[in-house]
Amino acid sequence: PYLKNRHLNTLSYDIAGMVSVVSQKFNGSIAICFPKETFLNIMNAMLGEEYKEITPEVEDGAGELMNIVFG
């Protein structure tokens, strides 16, 4: 995990799923980030298809993964 203001320039990723959180103790966003190859491997396994590129069809998968992890 990283605080956005500290490591923003050192992170390398191709796609991210994000969720905003607002509560009495926390106000910010949480992201799960992936390099292209890792993300496509996860989507291939989850959807039973073979994707070679990040397309609009699989972009929603990053958000769904964030929902799974955060939920």
Image (cartoon, rainbow, N blue to C red):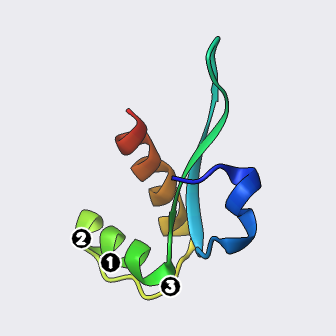
The first of marks 3 and 2 along the sequence is 2
Residue that numbered label 1 is attached to: 41
* C-alpha span from label 2 to label 1: 6 Å
Q: Secondary structure at mark 2?
A: helix
Q: Position of residue 18 (x, y in %)?
A: 59, 47
- Mark 2: which amino acid? Ala
- Residue at image coords 42%, 37%: 70
Mark 3–mark 2 Cα distance, whole angstroms, equals 15 Å
Q: Quadrant of residue 19?
A: top right
Work out whether 53 lies above or below 34.
Answer: below
At horizontal 32% and vertical 69% (from top left) the residue drawn is: 42
Between 11 and 60, the one lying in front of the other is: 11
Task: Measuring from the top left, give residue 29's x and y in whole percent.
Answer: 65, 39
Number of residues whose C-alpha sits closer than 10 Å to that of mark 2, classed few (under 14), some (14–19) or many (20 or more): few
The image shows residue 64 at horizontal and vertical percentages of 43, 49
Q: How many marks?
A: 3
Do the CB atoms of the residues marked 2 and 1 lie less than 8 Å apart?
yes
Query: 26 or 13, which lies in front?
Result: 26
Indicate which disc residue 53 carries.
3
Relative to 68, say whether 55 is above or below. below
- Residue type, mark 1 in image: Asn
Name the side, left or right, on which 36 lies relative to 46: right
Would you name the residue on which mark 2 appears?
Answer: 45
| The C terminus: image quadrant | top left
